[in-house]
Image: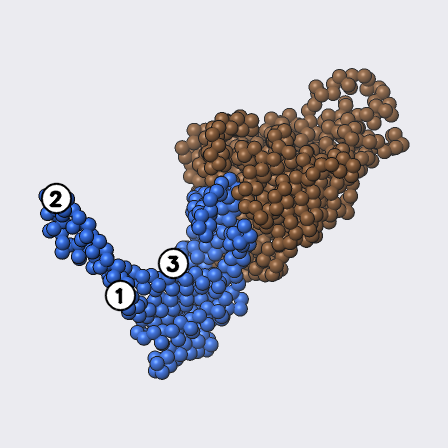
Chain colours: A blue, B brown
Amino acid sequence: MKYVDAVTDISIADIKIDLMRTAYDNDRALLNSFDPRVVLLWTVLFMIVPWLFYDPLPLAILLAAAFALAALSQVSKYLLALLLFGQVTNVGFFVVMVPAIGGTIQAVGYLRDNTGRVTEAIATLDPAVFGEIGSIVAGAAARGVDTALTSQEVGIDAVGAVVPFFLKLTIISVVSLAVFSAMSPRKLSKGMLRLGVPRQLTFAIAYGYRMMPLLVEEYHALVNSFRLRSEVPEKTGFLKWRYFYYLLKLSVKAFYPLIFNVAKRSRVTVEAMETKGFSRSLGDERSRALRTEGMMVRTRDVSFVFGSLFFVAAVWAFT
Amino acid sequence: MHSSDIVVEDLTFRYPGGDEPVLRDANLRIEPGEFTAVVGGNGSGKTTLCKTFNGLVPHFFEGRFDGRVTVAGTDTREAGVAELSKTVGYVFQDFENQLVQETVRDDVEFAPLNHGLDDYAERATRALELVGLEHLEDRFVWELSGGQQHLVALAGVLAMDPEFVFVDEPAAQLDPHNAREAYEQLRRLHEDHDKTVVVIEHHSEFVADYCDEMVLVSDGGVAWKEPVEVGLNRLDDLQAHDIHPPQVTGIAADLPDGSGRLADERYPVTVDEAATAFPSVRERTGERPHAADGGERVDRHGSAADADADPLITLDGVGHGYPTLREGYNRVLDGVDLDLYAGDRVALVGANGAGKSTLLRLITGLESPDEGTVTVLGRDTSETLPETLADDTVYIHQNPEEMFVEDTVRKDVGYYLRNRGAEDADERVDEIVDYLDLADLADRDGRLLSLGQQRRASLAIGLATDPTVVLLDEPTGSLDLQSRREVTGMLRKAESRVETVVVASHDLQLVAEWADRVVVMGEGDVLADAPPGEVFDDPDLLARTDLRRPQVVELSDRLGVDPAALTADGMVATLTDAAEATGALADVGSGIGGNDGTERRGDRR
């Protein structure tokens, strides 16, 4: 059972702390040292940039740069691994999918060509023709499988066609992960507020950051609560799949009580926010000005933007 | 009379849709400079009353509002909640959810920033200094302990520099040590910074130790407002509202004819007063008397007794810890050896973070020890799934809410049985529900019950599994005294069905009344493992682990009762015997014995 524990328990503490570090330990993150408005604009810019490239090579270089940025921003390795896993399986899926669909189309086509004979056979109820139906179906299946097996190349070609697309998506995902895990929520909401985002939204972001660890703890406690009162499937099956399916079920179930508990918490929170003058501050210019003061675009902010644009230009020119 | 008073005149308030008014013709005046406790039973309306002062009633909770509340001359109906909160600060009972920003400083600055005050930073600095948290200003709120979070909530209120500070049940969500710290803080605010402090409080011992005035709220109205010494002497009123007087006051009331009274004919309300009021046993008898209830409980597992008994639970060289955000790996347990036997009533005590909860979780198998082995009923927990260990072991979470996964208590109690395909599930659920008097609550959602009821329901969930071992994490962690008595009764009931009960607790009164084996945790290890009498006899150990002795033990020490009495009944018996022995009561006559038990006014638990 040791390795089961390794997956379910010991690593949970590690994953939790790793995610916490991603979200909360921003002091040394590179992106956190710039003016938040500049970083936000830069992010928007780099959501567009990857779409200007079509070849895999420059996109791969940009992706490498995005990973370097993510490393500097202390993005959780678990999150990155999850992201990569998702993208790689997506691409891999095409390798299987394209031939499979090709085969199915062939088989269906063959069946359709012979529909007349099949319906005829059913209408006459002639046993001899029934035999023929069997051979038609078998023929269809054979053609399908044959096509599927021989069209690997088509599949790989298809992957070649989608790789740049997935590269672009991955770049954007990694960049936004880097940005949002590197910037402290305070800076983020300050920058957004200054850029004219409504305060309700910036507050919600800050509040989300404050509540998240608590919810994680509570969720973990609820999952444990479920575990102590449930029965493990007796036969765990191949690769323990039944066991992991059971854990998966529990972890979904645990969301319901969590949502209820959150609703209960928020009752006090809204009262408290009223006493702290939150609704009063919404239309208050003075309050808004105080919240956003002290921001300044300095040379290093500007050089960061131009430096990265220069890097993109260089990639453009030399590939 | 000041113009800056809070004045409530003929206030009646009814929540929309409510049949009965929550507040009924309430009249009250709170003057600047007071340190006042508002007491009252559950549902008496004391929290609603206090929420009228900052305008939450009627601005936030709209309803039918008759009468008048004025704060420093302003009618609360004519000013908003935010404006009134500049004068009346409010720390909620559920203070954790009062903190809405991610770091300590951000949260304290939140209100001044909302009001657009230029000096918001200085205000926050001053408030943080007032509560002594300036070194934690950059910490994330969720990193702090409960006691620290309470101080942040207080600082957030102080940043607006209010004249009045209301604190709703500070002792309810904090352990006894932190609750006392919170009160010390409030006392400093009151004495050194001239704040008017009003607490809503169930624990009369805190009221006696810290407050000057006392308001009894009864049935939506204000029954009376009296100085604390006078109010706590109105034992009949208190009892009628489920408020238990301090232990010493209860003992005084039970002592034969007036021997427990002070010179001014009232009962003492603090240990200090009691020590002067009660006959000093030592002087009269010339020797230290023994507590009538034996003081030290029998050590059932003395070296000889358990030579042949196998422990149910064994911890062998257990080390365990957690990764933390800032301090790397935090080692909570370090080489712990411990054997727990059938029939043990074990109390795990120790300061916050001493590893009590960790130890319980290790026994459940939810976590495997980093080092060493934990064996429960012959199974190594590292090799066994927690689901399997749960066949015999039950863990009751310190926050009962985490145990409710269904929408009724009945379904929750039956959850385990149905999952295991027990055929007689319905009958067993019915039986447990009856056993713990949950019949009225069984069809309600566990999360919407009061804390005491939740605690009972969570024990029912546990007992339904027919466990051999019951582990309870802080069963009185956030309870009023009423519920503590329930918990003690509950534990006794549980004992008749299970082999071993282990309770992690800060509450030494519970420990004194219930446990027969106290395991003191600290510095990653077991510091002491002895019967309660012995542990209470070691003041250094208690101080080191942030534990505070129950009043009756403290009093035993002052009066020279040795070994210390552990319960109020024991103390009454000792004092009565000692007095009789010295003939001090000779002229009172022989009626004492007959009165004993019939004329009990003090409700001592």
Residue at image coords 49%, 70%: A72
Question: Along the horizontal axis of the image, is B338 left or right of A47?
Answer: right
* Figure quadrant of residue A47: bottom left
Circle 3 is placed at which residue position?
A198
Circle 2 is placed at which residue position?
A126
Q: Nearer the N terminus, badge 2 or badge 1?
A: 2
Are callouts 2 and 1 both on one chain?
yes
Circle 1 is placed at which residue position?
A151
Question: Along the horizontal axis of the image, is B47 left or right of B244?
Answer: left
Residue at image coords 51%, 28%: B428
Residue kind at label 3, given as amino acid type:
Pro
Residue at image coords 84%, 19%: B587
Tell me if residue A98 can be seen.
Answer: no
* Figure quadrant of residue B510: top right
Per the image, label 3 sits on a secondary structure element best described as loop
Q: Nearer the N terminus, badge 3 or badge 1?
A: 1
Give A150 or B122, whichever is nearer the viewer.
A150
Quick one: label 1, few (<14), some, or many (20+) residues within 10 Å?
A: some
Q: Disc 3 vs disc 1: which is toward the camera?
A: 1
Chain designation of label 2 = A
Per the image, label 2 sits on a secondary structure element best described as loop
Q: Disc 2 vs disc 1: which is toward the camera?
A: 2
